[in-house]
Amino acid sequence: MNEYFKEKNFYIETYGCQMNFYDTEIVVSIMNKMGFNYTNNIQYANVILINTCSIRQNAEDLIIKRLNTIKNIIHSDTIVGIIGCMAERLKHKLLNENELITFVVGPDSYEELPEVLFKAFNKIKSCNVTLSRTQTYDNIIPTSINKNIYSYISIMRGCDNMCTFCVVPFTRGRERSKNPVSIFKEIDVLLSKNIKKIILIGQNVDSYKWKKNNDVVDFSCLLDQIAKKFPELIITFTTSHPKDMTEDVIYTISNNKNILKYIHLPIQSGSNKILNLMKRKYDTETFLQKIHFIRQIIPNCSISTDIMTGFCGETEKDHSETLNIMEKIKFNFAYMFKYSNREGTYASKKMQDNLSDSEKNNRLQEIIELQKKHTLLRSSQFIGKYCNILINGRSKKSNKDFVGFNEQNYKVIFPKKDNLYPGKYVNVLIQSYSHNTLIGKISDEKR
């Protein structure tokens, strides 16, 4: 089929979550196998791929805006394809309403790219967006286009939770877990490329379950196996679901030194009424018990969360309850956003989005301001402490500084020293902080 591909350069942009960035590496591997070379200059590419996100409306708006920009800088015969969640969600609409787009390919259909590109080079538009019950890409080793010391590894795909606000089950399908043997093989390849840190990812990693005959590997078992099999690696994971995270997972984190003492546990709302409307399948009391258990078993664990404001039916009382639970927990970090109506979800079909944009913005700002206080409080607790830091690379703000992450997943900035480079470990004394970034200096002392 390669004889039809007169030019073999492709360019790819990625938007959205860690899973999208991992999928980009799957796509790069597939494109390389077809003889295409990645270029970081969009004007040198004859195939442009946009890996898209649909989790919120502003994500889709950003991509449409980007397509309008691309139209003015590329050659007329350049092939542009939309892949990822937006391709799955909007399907034929993208293909029919935007003349720039030649094809759309959903997250479960990347192995069909050879056929899709064959059609594209023959001026045939196509739409490949079928959701799969089995696709995990366990037969493909991802290829990174970045020089990082860390890498994502997908252990599962899809989601069965059907939260009323969420479009993920409609863009990524049902849950299915990857064979542990495939995961171990992928890690072996990453080690050969000098990767020092891996992030296990899935829409809900706690739902991971691999069955073979009478053997069952759940997430706590997989996590423990990886930690013990690859002791030289730093390991973390995302995202957990409060209803599914077990005590076994928490004990596994505590018992393995190479697993970061950091957990991302989305609460979404502090109101039981709103949690019920969201169909989150836990209440605030259960969530608080889980937080208490984490801090009891892993006292130095940092905890981040997701908080959504302005969901259908949310009142001032509900909003106050969210602020109250934030005060009780004092999360280290939080990803905060206002509710965005997503077509096709239960909330879009059955509930009324009854809050104005200004009300949502006001509540979101209150949440952001409160979280800033909590983040600063948590950050201040590191002053005067020594952290073992894996150097990630140069700081984006200064060529004179390195950046790395500590055991609690805090970003740490510190001055460079000769003979040090990404992948090396250093001992850093924390001297100050700026919001969720710690600032320090390399030290030979330990305390």
Image (tube, helix red, strand yellow):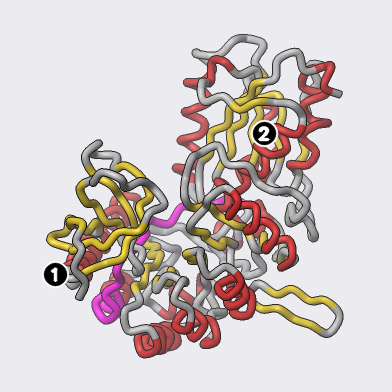
Q: Position of residue 258 (x, y in %)?
A: 46, 71
Would you say the residues marked 2 and 1 are in contact, meaning their CB atoms lie under 8 Å apart?
Answer: no
Quadrant assignment for the N terminus? top right
Residue at left offset 71%, top offset 68%: 180
Determine if the magenta segment contains residue 331.
yes
Q: Is residue 253 positioned above or below 435 on the image?
A: below
Residue 447 on image: x %, y %: 20, 76
Q: Nearer the viewer, mark 2 or mark 1?
A: 1
Residue at 56% x, 56% y is 348
Report the magenta residues as a range.
324-343
Q: Nearer the viewer, residue 46 or 9?
A: 9
Q: Residues within 10 Å of mark 1 (few under 14, many from 20)?
A: some
Q: Which residue is mark 1?
A: 384
Quadrant in the picture for residue 82? top right
Whether residue 85 sits left or right of residue 195 in the image: it is right
What residue is at 52 percent from the left and 25 percent from the top?
40
Q: How many marks?
A: 2
In this view, the residue in front, 5 or 280, is 5
Q: Residue 9 location in percent, x, y?
A: 64, 21
Q: Is residue 103 left or right of residue 229?
A: right
**For numbered disc 1, what is the local secondary structure?**
loop
Q: Amino acid at mark 2?
A: Lys
| Residue 293 among those drawn in magenta | no
In the image, residue 2 sits, relative to residue 306, either above or below, namely above
Which residue does the numbered mark 2 point to in the structure image?
A: 93
Compared across the picture, whether 57 is left or right of 218 comes to: left
Q: Position of residue 151 (x, y in %)?
A: 53, 52
Mark 2: few/some/many CA within 10 Å (<14, 14-19, 20+): few
Kindly identify the amino acid type of the residue bearing the numbered disc 1: Gly
Give me the residue at 76% from left, 44% from top. 109
Q: Residue furthest top?
A: 76
Residue at the extreme front: 419
